């Protein structure tokens, strides 16, 4: 059992050494991009929510 765990850890470490990690600047740029896209999508959803809510309120007042 202990041998299997050791082999798993060795193989995992070997695979991690093959990974091309992003630079600090790439990580920062992608993080900012995620925040900006999330904000834009949030605004988009909020605007449509307000429009649909106003439409349903208007339909509700007709009846």
Image (cartoon, rainbow, N blue to C red):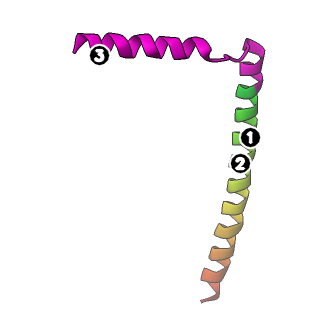
Disc number lying in front (3 or 2):
3
Query: Magenta stretch: dominant SS?
Result: helix
- Say which mark, if any, is on residue 41: 2
Q: Which residue is depicted at the point 71% across and 20% down?
A: 27
Question: What is the number of the mark on residue 61?
Answer: none
CA distance for labels 3 and 2: 46 Å
Q: Nearer the viewer, residue 9 or 39?
A: 9
**Where residue 37 is drawn, which disc sits there?**
1
N-terminal label among 3 and 2: 3
Quarter of the image with the C terminus in it: bottom right
Cβ–Cβ under 8 Å for marks 3 and 2? no
Q: Is residue 1 left or right of residue 57?
A: left
Q: Nearer the viewer, mark 3 or mark 1?
A: 3
Q: Looking at this view, name the residue that lies furthest to the bottom.
A: 63
Q: Is residue 42 above or below residue 20?
A: below
The boundaries of the magenta stretch are 1-29
Alpha carbon distance from label 2 to label 1 = 6 Å
Where is residue 25 shown, x and y percent of the image? 78, 15
Q: Which mark is residue 4?
A: 3
> CB under 8 Å between callouts 2 and 1?
yes
Residue 62 magenta-highlighted: no
Image quadrant where residue 18 sits: top right
Does the magenta run of residues contain 18?
Answer: yes
Vertically, is 26 above or below 52? above
* Nearer to the camera, 49 or 27: 27
Q: Position of residue 5 (x, y in %)?
A: 31, 14
């Amino acid at each position: 059992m202990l041998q299997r765990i050791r082999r798993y850890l060795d193989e995992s470490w070997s695979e991690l050494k093959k990974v091309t990690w992003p630079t600090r600047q790439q990580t920062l740029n992608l993080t900012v991009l995620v925040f900006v896209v999330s904000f834009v999508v949030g605004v988009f959803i909020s605007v449509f929510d307000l429009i649909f809510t106003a439409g349903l309120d208007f339909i509700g007042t007709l009846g």
